[in-house]
Amino acid sequence: MTERQQAEQPERRPRETGAATPPRRAASPRKTAAQVSSLLQLSSYLVSVLDPQELQAHLAARLVETLPSVQAGILWINHNGRLRPSAVVGLELDAPAVQLLMSSQLRPGEGVAGLAFQRLEPQIVATPLGYRATAEQIAPANLALFQHLGEHLPRHLTVAAVPLRVGSETLGVLELLNLGESSDHGWRPLARADIPMLQTFANLAASALKNAQLYAEAQRNERRLKAFDAVVTAISTATDLTDLVRSVLDVLVDLLPGSCGALLLREPAHDRLDLAAQHGLPPPCVAALRQLPVAEAPFAEVVHYGQPMQRPLLEERGEGAFLAAGLHACAYFPLLAGGTVAGVLALYGDSDLSKVADKEMLMPICNQVGFAIANVRLYADSQSERRKLHTVIASIAEGVLLCDAQGRLTMANDAALGLLRLDSPPFEQPLAAMPDFYRMRDMEGRPLHLEQLPFARALAGEVFQDYRLMLSGVSGDETVMSFSGAPARADDGTIEGAVVVFRDVTASQKLERAKDEFLAVAAHELRSPLAAVRSYADLLLRREQQRSEADPRDLHGLTILTQQVSHMLRMVDNLLDVSRIDAGQLDLQIQPINLVSLAGQVLDQQRPAAGNRSLVLTHDVDELLVEGDSLRIRQVLTNLVSNAIKYTPPESEITVSLCRLDADADAAQELAGPGVLVRVTDQGAGIPPEQQSKLFQRFYRARNSRAEGLGLGLYLSRQFVQMHGGRIWVESVEDAGSSFCFTLPLTQAQLQAHTAGDSAV
Ligand code: ADP
């Protein structure tokens, strides 16, 4: 037989061991009825207790009072499959034993209580060998406890354990001990016969316990909900960040009895926490929290890991001021906005703080507060950006207009109103009404179509500059405006509005016109005398060259004279071409041209100017016929080759290459068919990328420009190439050289030869 005794043995065993247990007497029916009635009364009392802590404390105590055959009891509560003592009655234990018991936890099967927990049915064991003998299995961690209880409790005892069950849930186990004491009233010790009664009571007690737990849970949820509601109200009614943190902290501290606290905001730029609000903290504590580098804060890990922390206050963590103020515990909660910590809620109180600072309640609240803080900051930032933008726009001398995706005006600066002669911005004006509203005309004075409006162009995705329109005033006067515009795009690229900037260019337009007219007249007037000077200079030079005793100094002087006069004549011709283009009077004389021989002639002409630079012509076929004006194409080629000579060091190579382009080649896009690609490549200093796009503008000269020249050569070249339906561009790498390329369409004849050649292959 094992040390552990089964329920049927208690009657026999004490006698066998001769223990001084009083003889057991059968309970009279009257006494049993009284006992049942007391248990029922106790049950109805228990049902009325709604606080689970109070209920657990009273349950064992009242049961021991009610049942004369029970002198002690332990209420074990199920915590995730382990039994932990929640209330102990009638065991006169010394402090270490109490400490051992209260920190213990039983696994299923350990001791009588663990056995009832495992088997889900009542257990009863009587023994004359002490409490230690009631346990069949004991985990090493609990050996000391059972040993201790064995030494402190009488050897003769009966232990009964009843599971507390509601439905399929086991809330805990009620362990009842008869310590072998005799009853004055003749009650017998606990016996198997008492089990049904105890189980019935345990069922009622379990229901009461469950009720209390559910009630407490409901209360807790209601409290959390109210707290959440109060915080949300505080957040939504706050006027700014200061107001928000103050009212949120007031609400939170009021919710947690006996607490005081502070709310600190994180300053990410300096990795610092600034005190934003405090409630009930003594001045030295406020001073300790005023401004804290994150690394030095007593709650640095809360900021780093975004996890709450509750603990006693510690001198070594810099919390001396709080301890001196009589506070004992702290709870720090991160105010999380997404993944970042926007601040920290610091709560202080006595050692009960951890009970009131309910993590489940405070974490969602802190997340809410974190988001609210982030939103307020974001809003403040965007407002400040907006203000800055307004200031910048207002101070710009040009007119600035902003519109939404529908073209409705959203912002206009004073300069815009002044230029448009408006008293107030027409914010509600739909885009369709704009042409009439602003009385805009194109430069020929024709009314604008909707799609010609600056806003409409920008909303269509176009970025444009110096788009000139006329605005007619009420008195019939006309103002020329130069508009620049661009679409405003959202992150995903969709157009959500447009920006248009404009200025009055009437005066400069007039000046430009006067200048152009002057240049045209001057060029015209200069051309005839210059042409005459060049003819005579040429004549004199030829004569001097033919003279046998020619003076080399005269020859040199006459050569320079002819070159310079030719150069002046070229500049004058360029000016005349520009004014002809402006007046729309430059007509092309289209005819088939063999580009190979034309390029050869141009190179031959340029050779004297090239000095010791080598000029090379490459071509993939001997004849490349293009439709064009030979004068203008010669002008383009001459200009590109003479630029290459000007900007290339001596002894380097300049190549003109000609090749056919298939219709699907990228460079042939504008040609609407196959064409020719002309490439003039030099080994000069190249052109910086930011200047390349401007080279083809009128009068533009890059930083590397030589003294001679007007900046018209490339402008005219582009005009001529475009008039032929081609395209001109530059490819250049600094310090490596440049390639100026242009395309021209092939003639029909060449086209047929081209396709025939292709099919022959
Ligand atoms: P101009 O030669 O009269 O200055 P162009 O219109 O022909 O005017 O050229 C404009 C500018 O482009 C020049 O001033 C020069 O700075 C630059 N440029 C033209 N061709 C070259 C080149 N081959 N290498 C470097 N820079 C060049």
Image: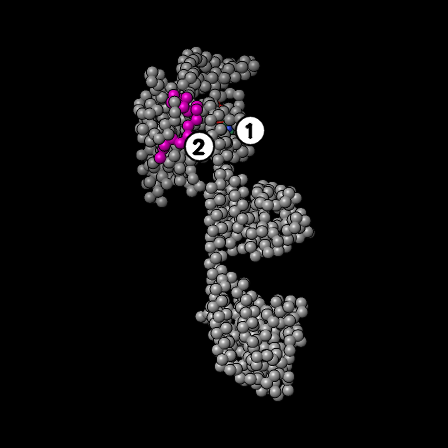
Note whether 149 is above or below 270 in the view shown: below
Label 2 – label 1 distance at C-alpha: 22 Å
Instruction: Please tell me which residue lies in front, 175 or 589.
Output: 175
Callout 1 secondary element: loop
Callout 2 secondary element: strand
Q: Nearer the viewer, mark 2 or mark 1?
A: 2
Q: Which residue is mark 1?
A: 649
Work out whether residue 460 can be spotted.
no
Amino acid beneath label 1:
Pro
**Mark with earlier residue (2, 1):** 1
Q: Position of residue 165 (x, y in %)?
A: 48, 71
Q: Position of residue 450 (x, y in %)?
A: 32, 30
Q: Position of residue 191 (x, y in %)?
A: 54, 81
Based on the displayed image, in which of its 4 quarters is residue 18 positioned? bottom right
Q: Which mark is residue 356?
A: none
Q: Position of residue 417 (x, y in %)?
A: 40, 23
Q: Residue at x 45, y 19 (%)?
A: 571
Q: Residue at x 32, y 21 (%)?
A: 445
Q: Is residue 420 magenta?
A: yes
- Quadrant placement of the N terminus: bottom right
Within 10 Å of the Cα at label 1, are there few (<14), some (14-19), or many (20+) other Cα atoms? Answer: some
What is the span of residues highlighted in magenta in the rendered image? 406-422
- Give the farthest residue toward the bottom: 16
- Quadrant placement of the C terminus: top left
Amino acid beneath label 2:
Trp
Q: Which mark is residue 729?
A: 2
Q: How is the image coloured?
A: one colour
